[in-house]
Amino acid sequence: MKKIIPIASLEALHSETATAEVPLQLVHPNGFLKDTRGRLLHDLRISVTDRCNFRCPYCMPKEIFTSDYNYLGQKELLSFEEITRVSKIFISHGVEKIRLTGGEPLLRKGIEDLVAMLSPLQTLQQQPIDLTLTTNGSLLKKKAQGLKDAGLKRITVSLDGINDATFRKMNDVDFPVKDVLESIEAAVAVGFASVKVNMVVKNGVNDHEILPMVKHFKNTGVIVRFIEYMDVGNTNGWQMQEVLPSKSVIERIQAVYPLTPVISQYPSEVAQRWKLVDGTGEIGVISSVTETFCHNCSRARLSMEGKLFLCLFATKGYDLRALLRSQSDDLVLANAIANIWQSRDDQYSELRTQIQQGVIFHPKVEMSYIGG
Ligand code: SAM
Ligand code: SF4
Ligand code: SF4
């Protein structure tokens, strides 16, 4: 049994908490909720725990996330019933896609039960909700079948290298790559409709793993997506030199495995997709730093204790838990959420350069707190 390292309540690193205001006049949700830039609310990411058993230096550097940190108590976390209730309200505003994340979501006790409560939900078009989960894969081998049986259709596993030494360095808790690779095989074997692998690329640290990753997952049906290392949070000491632009990732792959672009059908899709010309697989790149996609960003994020964040780089979270735990009915909650989304003007990535240069002051929250 691997040691589980609790992470901080992160209160010191947290942002400001804002009250979720309820407008005087209540209106029924109509599934088309627009923010100040005309962006609809389509995706909800729910972080189910603030704990993780890895210490990826780009996300939860171990010097900061030590075992002395306080972490949220069970009562502070949203219960599965609260998560399900709030999810239904988000769906009434047009949400079609829900991703469970964390921290490490498979550390949340009974996660299969939450999946079983969310998977039957339907969109306003009476289609099954697109429910997915992102995991570091450490516990997935054991849990893959249970998650599938609970109704999970898709899964994403984070894997920052195929070489054992590199992977141990990336997770910083000496976790062997073999266990995660077996988890990915288990996910394929139980028959998820889609198994994706996300690799965060840090220039000079694990970029030598790009080609081995493509080689390893060719012919497996698993899609690998290379993500630019982002300046989320305040603790990872991000520097632009450590970002390997997706353009370079594609050039490196192209030189060995010829690629052809796949045209995306979804405007809010963040990955640029490419097929291997020889038909052996597909890869994707997510250019979170070098190309901004704020103009299409339809994502809200809910933290484990029920704060609503409007951007990965948000400075404040709106306290939905207080409303959830009051006597407020669903219409009140729906209006509070609408009020918050309608005032949204977040566009961090478009302002990144000015923020990095100190022209604009912008405190942030940690990625492990609101989920990727
Ligand atoms: N623990 C789970 C995992 O690692 O898949 C879920 C939570 S993790 C915060 C979600 C995703 O965010 C992971 O794919 C991780 O690699 C990514 N991530 C974390 N910090 C990042 C950063 N600074 N830049 C880019 N991606 C990051
Ligand atoms: Fe944990 Fe995921 Fe963050 Fe790594 S990226 S420290 S696995 S939450
Ligand atoms: Fe969305 Fe914020 Fe990322 Fe822009 S920076 S794409 S608004 S999460």
Image: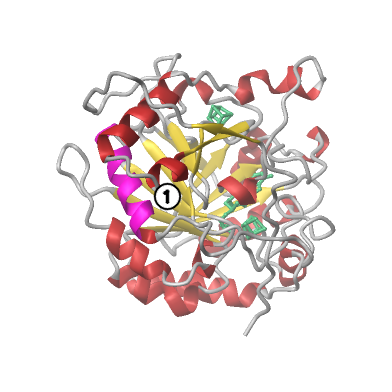
Picture coordinates of residue 14 (x, y %)?
68, 42
Point 67% across, 66% down: residue: 6
Point 33% across, 28% down: residue: 335
Depth order, front residue of 15/134: 15
Q: Main secondary structure of the magenta part?
A: helix
Report the span colored magenta. Answer: 81-93
Picture coordinates of residue 102 (x, y %)?
55, 55
Q: Say left or right for 262 vs 271.
A: left
Point 53% across, 57% down: residue: 76
Residue position for label 1: 99
**Residue 39 appears in the picture as rendered:** yes
Picture coordinates of residue 166 (x, y %)?
76, 64
Q: Say left or right for 245 vs 109.
A: right
Q: Say left or right for 255 vs 149.
A: right
**Callout 1: 10 Å neighbours few (<14), some, many (20+)?**
many
The quarter of the rendering in which ligand 3 is drawn is top right
For residue 361, what is the image quadrant?
top right
Q: Is residue 318 above or below residue 3?
A: above
Point 74% across, 38% down: residue: 243
